[in-house]
Image (cartoon, rainbow, N blue to C red):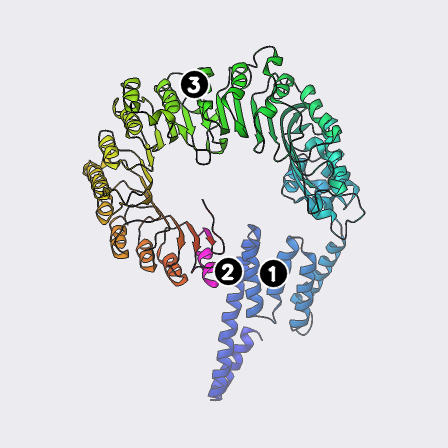
């Protein structure tokens, strides 16, 4: 009905005084006018969205047009056009078919209805066309497309056509990083009896691969990789890692020669830069020959070698052999945790001359005696980083005797994971003298580091050391009466000029600790950032030392529990004095950011309230038993520091409950909360906490027994906090 006809009918009813008909016709006319303008506005916006490429918004408007006017063609025309533009011809055809059933055809020629029929016909014609867009795109764009495909998806693409296979096999970015699990794919019912697609493609794509990891399920499969490796097929590879998935008995014939093997290799134009092997049953003479050949053929380019023997004792190549075949080797990593170093050292005299290239040595062995290690240090004078795990006490004496000023990092019974690399050391600005900059000496089982040996190293490198971590142990010398006099006369005047981090474990002798503390106060060092002491009862002496220095950034007191000596009050009072001293400093001089109390039996209410006065405090880490009197006191402390704490760690504190969580939730800047070993907080309290704490981005609940992993509460918490870890069924020791 046209607007004019509608108006004439209303006028006619009005003249005849048919008021009910006037109301009905007027209401229909008003709705029609509103609908017409509303649909027109939506259509205009959908068209604009489509032109700018915002198809999801445009489609929402078109669908809204159809919902509002399901019998009008305009909404279907717009939606079909948007789908067709995106190449979704099948979806467009369905829309047009639906519209032809829903739209009412007007008398005579209805342009809108005719347009729907024509649009459907064009969509069907386009649907029948086959356009290979991949062959029309520049290679750079094709590479970018296939770069994000998974490996199974790429193999499916290779089956599309000969042209696609050719493009993919010559696409460097698509194969730059490859991961393949042979056990998973080859155990599939669709793959049984067939050569894996990766093995069929490998000779063609190997030249593109830079990083590859393959989990193989047979020796034959592994041999294919090794043959390609030896023949130079991996021309640009940086890392190649092969490992055997062993779900069967290790005596199965397939695993006769390999139980677990990993190769990682840097190999450019048949020049190998890095090999990494992890083996447990490496007895095949052919594979042994492959390894020795690799060493020989790459003797001029090999710079890093990583060997892990595990429980295996049949790998008959020594450190001497490795250094002989690899004169330019810079990094040597060897893991033999169940065998002594003596088994794999060899006779270093066979080298004939010094191996000057070796800089980084990392060895893990069951036993590393000093005399066995000594030839390695003598024939490798360029070592800058020495990381040893399994040391005997006389290793420190050998290092002190043999190593020259090139040695920068020495780790005693410590592996290299948490230590800086030589590259990082080179990048860091350092204007001090040559010598050791890092000494990390930890205990091996129940044995600590000999105090007399480590003190010699510290004294010798006092001007260059930046980080010292020493887990001291009592020695025979400490049993004699003149022990203190010996230390006082030997280390009477010394101090660290550049020390930034000091960590030590008390060895039971006040003389040792006083020497260490004297070394940082004699020169009034301004560089100390971290002070950490373990198992020492001498808190007042530590406080007297720290007050003489500029405020440290981190203070850690660990496992200090001397409940029977009656001196806990003095320890608490000393800490209160230290914190009050820090708090009284001008704001620009306050520097203490983190405090850690781990199993300390003298952390009282007064200590907490003194700590709360330090405005620079950002992180607290409390663990184990403490003497805080009640949750109320801890809540008061948290209220006092709520405006500046950003990270809180509580482990094994039995007074942490939902009320404490409420206090934590009200903190203005709290971003990280870690709670562990707790049986007080509930899921209800945890939900209330995450709802209140608007700044939190990391939450760890480790073995909080009333907060479970797979519940509505845990799922809700994970939906609110970006980084959430909840462990309830098992306990993780960090």
Q: Nearer the viewer, residue 21 or 422?
A: 422
**Residue marked by disc 2:** 710
Q: Which residue is located at x 75 percent, y 30 percent?
A: 227
Q: How crowded is mark 3: few (under 14 residues within 10 Å), some or many (20 or more)?
A: some
Q: Which of marks 2 and 3 is in front?
A: 3
Residue behind mark 1? 78
Residue 270: in sight, yes or no?
no
User: Residue 308, which numbered label?
Assistant: none
Q: Please tell me which of labels 3 and 1 falls first in the chain.
A: 1
Query: Most extreme residue toward the left, as rendered?
Result: 584
Label 2, label 3: how far apart the Cα atoms are: 55 Å
Q: Which of marks 3 and 1 is in front?
A: 3
Count of marks placed on residues: 3
Provide residue 44's location: percent of width, then percent of height. 54, 59
What is the x, y in percent for residue 150?
65, 45
Residue 84 belongs to the span the image colors magenta: no
Drawn side of residue 174 relative to residue 542, left or right = right
Q: Quadrant of residue 63?
A: bottom right
Q: Is mark 3 on a helix, strand or loop?
A: helix
The residue lying toward the viewer, choosing from 552 and 666, is 552
The stretch in magenta equals 707-725
Label 2: how many residues lie within 10 Å, few (<14), some (14-19) or many (20+)?
few
**Label whose residue precedes the other's in the sequence (2 or 1):** 1
Residue 721 covered by magenta stretch: yes
Residue that appears at 57% across and 14% down: 355
SS at mark 2 in the image: loop
Residue at left offset 67%, top offset 60%: 91
Q: Is mark 1 on a helix, strand or loop?
A: helix
Vertical side of 375 occupied by 569: above or below: below
């Amino acid at each position: 009905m046209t607007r004019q006809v509608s108006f004439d009918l209303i006028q006619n009813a009005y003249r005849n005084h048919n008021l009910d008909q006037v109301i009905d016709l007027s209401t229909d006319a008003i709705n029609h006018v509103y609908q017409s303008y509303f649909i027109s506005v939506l259509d205009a916006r959908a068209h604009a969205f489509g032109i700018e490429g915002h198809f999801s918004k445009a489609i929402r408007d078109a669908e809204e047009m159809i919902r509002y006017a399901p019998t009008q063609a305009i909404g279907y025309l717009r939606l079909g056009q948007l789908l067709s533009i995106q190449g979704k011809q099948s979806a467009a055809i369905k829309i047009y078919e639906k519209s032809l059933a829903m739209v009412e055809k007007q008398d005579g020629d209805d342009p809108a209805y005719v347009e729907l029929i024509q649009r459907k016909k064009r969509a069907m014609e386009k649907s029948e066309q086959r356009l290979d867009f991949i062959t029309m795109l520049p290679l750079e764009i094709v590479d970018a497309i296939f770069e994000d495909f998974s490996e199974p998806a790429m193999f499916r693409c290779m089956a599309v056509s000969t042209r696609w296979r050719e493009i993919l096999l010559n696409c460097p970015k698509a194969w730059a990083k490859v991961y393949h699990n042979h056990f998973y794919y080859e155990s599939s019912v669709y793959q049984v009896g067939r050569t894996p697609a990766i093995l069929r493609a490998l000779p063609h794509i190997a030249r593109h691969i830079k990083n590859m990891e393959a989990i193989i399920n047979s020796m034959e499969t592994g041999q294919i990789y090794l043959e390609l490796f030896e023949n130079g097929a991996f021309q640009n590879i940086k890392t190649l890692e092969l490992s055997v998935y062993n779900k069967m008995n290790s005596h199965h014939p397939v695993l006769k020669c390999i139980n677990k093997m990993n190769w990682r290799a840097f190999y450019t134009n048949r020049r190998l830069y890095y090999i990494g092997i992890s083996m447990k049953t490496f007895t095949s003479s052919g594979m042994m020959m492959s390894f020795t050949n690799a060493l020989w053929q790459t003797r001029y380019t090999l710079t890093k070698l990583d060997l892990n023997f595990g429980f295996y004792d049949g790998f008959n190549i020594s450190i001497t052999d490795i250094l002989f075949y690899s004169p330019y080797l810079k990094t040597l990593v060897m893991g033999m945790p169940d065998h002594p170093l003596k088994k794999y050292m060899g006779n270093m005299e066979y080298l004939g001359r010094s191996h000057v290239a070796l800089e980084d040595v990392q060895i893990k062995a069951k036993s590393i005696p000093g005399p066995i290690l000594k030839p390695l240090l003598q024939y490798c004078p360029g070592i800058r980083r020495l990381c040893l795990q399994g040391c005997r006490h006389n290793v420190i004496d050998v290092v002190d005797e043999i190593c020259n000023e090139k040695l920068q990092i020495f780790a005693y019974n410590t592996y290299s994971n948490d230590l800086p690399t030589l590259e990082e050391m080179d990048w860091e600005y350092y204007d001090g003298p040559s010598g050791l900059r890092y000494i990390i000496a930890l205990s091996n089982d129940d044995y600590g580091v000999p105090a007399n040996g480590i003190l010699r190293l510290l004294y010798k490198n006092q001007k260059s050391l930046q980080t010292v971590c020493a887990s001291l142990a009592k020695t025979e010398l400490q049993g004699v009466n003149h022990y203190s006099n010996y230390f006082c006369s030997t280390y009477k005047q010394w101090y660290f000029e550049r020390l930034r981090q000091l960590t030590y474990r008390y060895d039971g002798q006040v003389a040792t600790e006083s020497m260490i503390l004297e070394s940082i106060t004699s020169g009034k060092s301004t560089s100390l950032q971290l002070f950490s002491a373990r198992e020492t009862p001498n808190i007042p002496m530590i406080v007297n030392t720290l007050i003489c220095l500029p405020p440290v950034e981190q203070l850690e007191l660990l496992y200090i529990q001397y409940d029977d000596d009656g001196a806990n009050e003095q320890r608490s009072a000393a800490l209160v004095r230290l914190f009050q001293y820090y708090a009284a400093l001008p704001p620009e001089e306050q520097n203490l950011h983190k405090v850690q109390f781990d199993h300390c039996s003298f952390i009282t209410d007064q200590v907490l309230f003194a700590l709360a006065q330090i405005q620079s405090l950002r992180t607290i880490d409390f663990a184990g038993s403490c003497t805080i009197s009640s949750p109320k006191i801890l809540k008061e402390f948290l209220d006092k520091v709520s405006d500046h704490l950003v990270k809180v760690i509580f482990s094994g504190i039995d007074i942490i409950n939902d009320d404490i969580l409420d206090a934590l939730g009200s903190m203005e800047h709290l971003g990280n909360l870690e709670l562990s070993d707790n049986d007080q907080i509930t899921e209800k309290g945890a939900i209330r906490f995450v709802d209140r704490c608007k700044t939190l981005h990391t939450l760890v609940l480790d073995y909080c027994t009333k907060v479970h992993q797979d519940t509505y509460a845990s799922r809700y918490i994970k939906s609110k906090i970006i980084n959430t870890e909840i462990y309830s069924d098992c306990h993780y020791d960090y």
